[in-house]
């Protein structure tokens, strides 16, 4: 079974079923669309401590003035 989102099905549900305009549809995240369609649990599992630590290691905070704007 192929993984990923069923974009044609989601587009039909959002634009035809919910009456969203294309601009409104594409402004939504998949999780927001799933909530609007009444589907719960469409998102990923909550971020666990070990994954948070991995992200902190891979993307450390930089000191102010390090070119971050």
Image: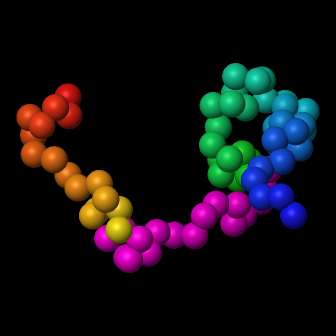
Q: Residue at x 77, y 58 (%)?
A: 3
Q: Residue at x 41, y 71 (%)?
A: 51
Residue 60 in picture, x, y percent from top left: 23, 55
Residue 65 in picture, x, y percent from top left: 8, 34
Q: In which quarter of the view is residue 64 placed?
A: top left
Residue 41 in picture, x, y percent from top left: 69, 66
- Whether 43 is among the magenta residues is yes
Q: Is residue 53 left or right of residue 65?
A: right
Work out which quarter of the rendered image holds the C terminus and state it.
top left
- In the rendered image of this protein, does residue 2 appear above or below residue 49? above
Residue 22 in picture, x, y percent from top left: 76, 24
Residue 18 in view, yes or no: no
Decide which of 2, 52 is in the foreground and name it.
Answer: 2
Q: In which quarter of the view is residue 29 placed?
A: top right
- Whether 40 is among the magenta residues is yes
- In the rendered image of this protein, does residue 18 appear above or below residue 3? above
Decide which of 62, 13 is in the foreground and name it.
Answer: 62
Q: Is residue 30 left or right of residue 19?
A: left
Work out which quarter of the rendered image holds the N terminus and state it.
bottom right
Residue 51 in view, yes or no: yes
Decide which of 49, 66 is in the foreground and name it.
Answer: 66
Q: Give the residues drawn in magenta, as a range.
A: 37-53
Q: Residue at x 84, y 31 (%)?
A: 15
- In the rendered image of this protein, does residue 50 appear above or below residue 11? below
The total number of labels drawn is 0
């Amino acid at each position: 079974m192929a993984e990923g989102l069923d974009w044609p099905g989601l587009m039909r549900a959002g634009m035809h079923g919910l009456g969203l305009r294309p601009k409104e549809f594409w402004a939504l995240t998949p999780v927001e669309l799933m909530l609007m369609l009444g589907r719960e649990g469409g998102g990923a599992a909550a971020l666990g401590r070990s994954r948070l630590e991995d992200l902190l290691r891979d993307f450390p905070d930089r000191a102010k003035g390090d070119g971050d704007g």
